[in-house]
Amino acid sequence: MRFLDKLMGWFSVDMGIDLGTCNTLVCVRGKGIVLNEPSVVAVKKGTNQVLQLKDGYAVGWVAKEMLGKTPGSISAIRPLKDGVISDFEITEAMLSYFINKVNGKGPFMRPRVVIAVPSGITAVEKRAVLDSAERAGARRVYLVEEPMAAGIGAKLPVVEATASMIVDIGGGTTEVAIISLADIAQCESIRVAGDDLDEAIISHMKKAYNLMIGEQTAEKIKIEIGSAVPMTGGPDSPDGQEKTMEVRGRDMISGLPRKTVVTSEEIRECLQEPLMQIVEAVTRTLEKAEPELAADLVDNGICLAGGGALLRGISTMIANSTGLDVRIADDPLTCVARGTAIYLEHLEEWKGTMESDLDAG
């Protein structure tokens, strides 16, 4: 059976998937990341039928552009919330679309798939991922914990007898883990991440300006002027000065479209509550670490991955709170996906360390 599976692997396009709340990344063994699209699907209202356009299905980038702009007959849905599946059928349709897009019509063999999942999800939530991927067209499904994949993708020495600490700030969850000898020694998964930063900005715009804005506008504000600590650099530094931004939305009193100007100082202030929850998760994980592992981290420091790592000043904020060196991984957005690709390359030797559809029965 093992030989047959290996033989089939030679003819299938095996893939690793970072099934994220905001974005789904797919990588193929030997080719790297081949797909990076938003985890959004447009459906006909009241059904689970994916909207079909003249040039394909409304999934990914096409569907994201529809968020907040759809007519009454169409719904643009994000089928994952807080890193887990909230809509089983839509997730299955989305996965099927992505797998078929990568697999193409050439290979006749269904692929083996490695999927990264948050470390804190329940057995039922894992089962939902396994079932969705199987029904979407995978021959065999393996689950790997996100912090482990992120650590490998960030090129941390995870297999060595030394502590490596990864903080993966995604869209739905923040994964904090201390890894040693190819396993997680201590970890915490909290459902506070990039989406909560966006929600904090939406809430601030309502309270301070009586202005309703959508998710995409909030994300744009976060990216353009958001920060975790005051920007104190000189005027020649693009990230070293406070900024302003013109924001458009709907007036909550008159109901009419309106624009206003917001500052980076007020956006930083409204982001403090969710950011402090992330910092507290980091400090809690450090407090639970074995003394020898804690000692290693004095030299090895902390590595940040995920889209949240790109928020200005977040490395400084965590460094100030922990007293440790904090660095941002190269291309933090793709760390988890690159980690799944490395798992794919070593599938035969590492599959015993991963949960699979065989384990689930």
Image (cartoon, rainbow, N blue to C red):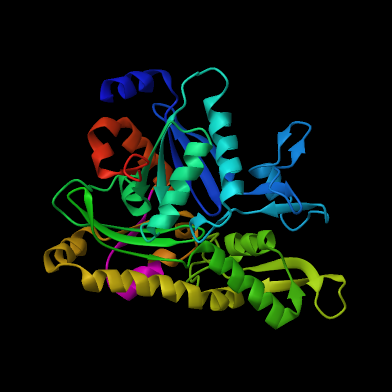
Task: Give the magenta-colored segment's residue range.
Answer: 316-329
Q: Quadrant of the N terminus?
A: top left
* Residue 137 percent across, percent down from the top left: 51, 32
Q: Place residue 216 in its image quadrant.
A: bottom right
- Whether residue 33 is situated above or below residue 309 in the rendered picture: above
Left or right, 312 with respect to 349, comes to right
Observer-nearest of 239 and 67: 67
Q: Is residue 313 magenta?
A: no
Q: Quadrant of the C terminus?
A: top left
- Whether residue 3 is situated above or below residue 309 in the rendered picture: above
Q: Is residue 323 magenta?
A: yes
Left or right, 304 with respect to 207, comes to left
Observer-nearest of 83 and 158: 83
Residue at position x 71%, y 44% in the image:
49
* Residue 208 percent across, percent down from the top left: 69, 82
- Whether residue 137 is situated above or below residue 69 in the rendered picture: above
- Asked whether the viewer can see residue 193, the reply is yes
- Asked whether the viewer can see residue 229, the reply is no
* Residue 17 percent across, percent down from the top left: 45, 41
Observer-nearest of 84 and 274: 84
Residue at position x 64%, y 59% in the image:
220
Left or right, 254 with respect to 89, comes to right
Observer-nearest of 14 and 149: 14
* Residue 139 percent across, percent down from the top left: 43, 31
